[in-house]
Image: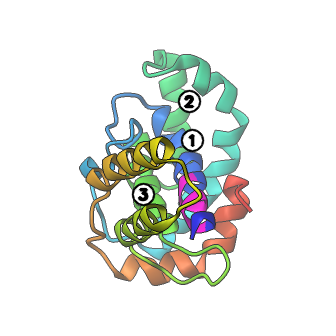
Amino acid sequence: MRQVVRHIAGVAAALMLGLAWVGGNDAAQGQTGDVKQIKLTEQMVKNFIAAQKELTAIADELQKAGDKPDPKLQSKIDGIAKKNGFANFNDLDDVAANVSMVMAGLDPQSGEYTDPAESIKAEMAEIKKDTTIPEKDKKQMIDEMTEALKTTPPLQFKENIALIKKHHKEIEAALGTQ
């Protein structure tokens, strides 16, 4: 179970890295409860995958910009989004957030989807029962997971699961999370 939670955290971190580049986006700052949930299409997912190579190429530049990229950099990321079929980076950002929500719930071994909130609850139960974890550490872990649970919204578009499963390997390859 801990592998699943670590996988969730890893996938979410990889996807949210891209979201952080535009700054000001609550999803990028870990407030996933504010994600604009959308029904994904096959083309949106393919366009998202295609955009990753170019976004990765300017990752250092984007990280240095922090929350407020200069107009030239903003123009560059909007250009990448447009080149890959999005109206602007905000549209790509919305797709990335929705892809992230599903990817976070996919088990790395079986590929089966489990709602991330349910995974967090199950992990919390395991931690509470684990007698090998010192109480101080256990409390910190439970507190952190309780906070994560507060910002984990339910998935509104269940049909996104099948679409992301279909492209799971491509998404992981594009993000370098395999």
Residue that carries the numbered disc 2 in the rendered image: 76
Residue pictured at 67% horizontal, 79% vertical: 109
Q: Amino acid at mark 3?
A: Val
The vertical placement of 59 against 95, above or below, is: above
Q: Measured from the top left, where is residue 164 in percent x and y?
A: 52, 74
Q: How far separated are the C-alphas under marks 3 and 2?
A: 18 Å
Q: Measured from the top left, where is residue 174 in percent x and y?
A: 69, 57
Residue sitting at the far top: 70
Horizontal side of 161 relative to 18 (left or right) equals: left
Horizontal side of 148 relative to 81 (left or right) equals: left
Disc with the residue nearer the chain's start (3 vs 2): 2
Residue that carries the numbered disc 3 in the rendered image: 95
Which residues, given as a range, are shown in magenta?
4-9
Secondary element at tag 3:
helix
Q: How far separated are the C-alphas under marks 2 and 1?
A: 6 Å
- Of discs 3 and 2, which sits in the foreground? 3
Q: Measured from the top left, where is residue 119 in percent x and y?
A: 43, 70
